[in-house]
Amino acid sequence: MNLPLPKLGNPVIRQKSTPVPPAEINTPAFQKFIDDLIDTMHANEGVGIAAVQVGRPRSVFVVESQGNLRYPGAPDIPLLVFINPEVEFTTKEEEKDWEGCLSVPGLRGLVPRYKSLRVKALDRTGKSFQFEADGFFARVIQHEWAHLQGKVYLDFMKGMETLTFLDEYAKFWAK
Ligand code: ZN
């Protein structure tokens, strides 16, 4: 089910997400919520979405990028569910790239992010996993993880000079 998306300005977007008790993960209600989150990401052509972006400040996000229309040319990312994620940066090096957000529709901006990280989380069966990611994949994870702290990409921009409406982005900045 494609869930409605509150936008920046709705106080829920700034709320900090709370951990999901592991015993709740395998309940039908929570499994349905994960399916709805995935449906909502797909319906909106997102490469990731956090639960707080559909108004539920729980520590969960999903990612996937395969031939995405909003991010053409982006490397493929498999469908992954992260519950109670912990992120640790494995470099101090940053790089800038364009980001948008389903909670800030119609805009893009250049955002510096750490180039690589290690992420540890529970999957949708409650099993623990961890891996290292870099580049675009690491960027997507940082973006979604920040939502769990009530942060959006605008908070990570060094200035607003590159903030760009999508139609102007397509004309002047699309790679
Ligand atoms: Zn976002």
Image: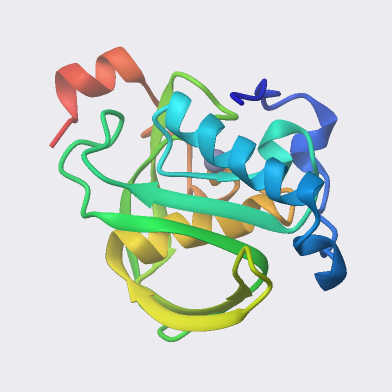
- The location of residue 151, given as percent across then percent down, is 67, 49
Screen quadrant of the N terminus: top right
Q: In this view, does 144 lie above or below 89?
A: above
- The location of residue 53, given as percent across then percent down, is 67, 36
Rendered residue at 62%/75% (across/down): 121
Residue 101 visible in rendering: no
Screen quadrant of the C terminus: top left
- Residue 165 sits in quarter: top left
Q: Is residue 117 above or below residue 44?
A: below
Residue most toward the front?
Answer: 28
Rendered residue at 84%/31% (across/down): 11
Residue most toward the bottom?
Answer: 90
Q: Nearer the viewer, residue 6 or 95?
A: 6
Rendered residue at 62%/35% (across/down): 36
**26 with respect to 79 (left or right):** right
- The location of residue 106, given as percent across then percent down, is 44, 18
Residue 106 visible in rendering: yes
Q: Nearer the viewer, residue 34 or 101?
A: 34
**143 with respect to 27 (left or right):** left
Tell me the colour scheme of the image. Answer: rainbow
**166 with respect to 152 (left or right):** left
Q: Nearer the viewer, residue 71 or 38?
A: 38
Image-quarter location of ligand 1: top right
Q: In this view, does 174 lie above or below 125?
A: above
- Tell me how many marks there are: 0
Rendered residue at 68%/56% (across/down): 60
- Residue 56 sits in quarter: top right
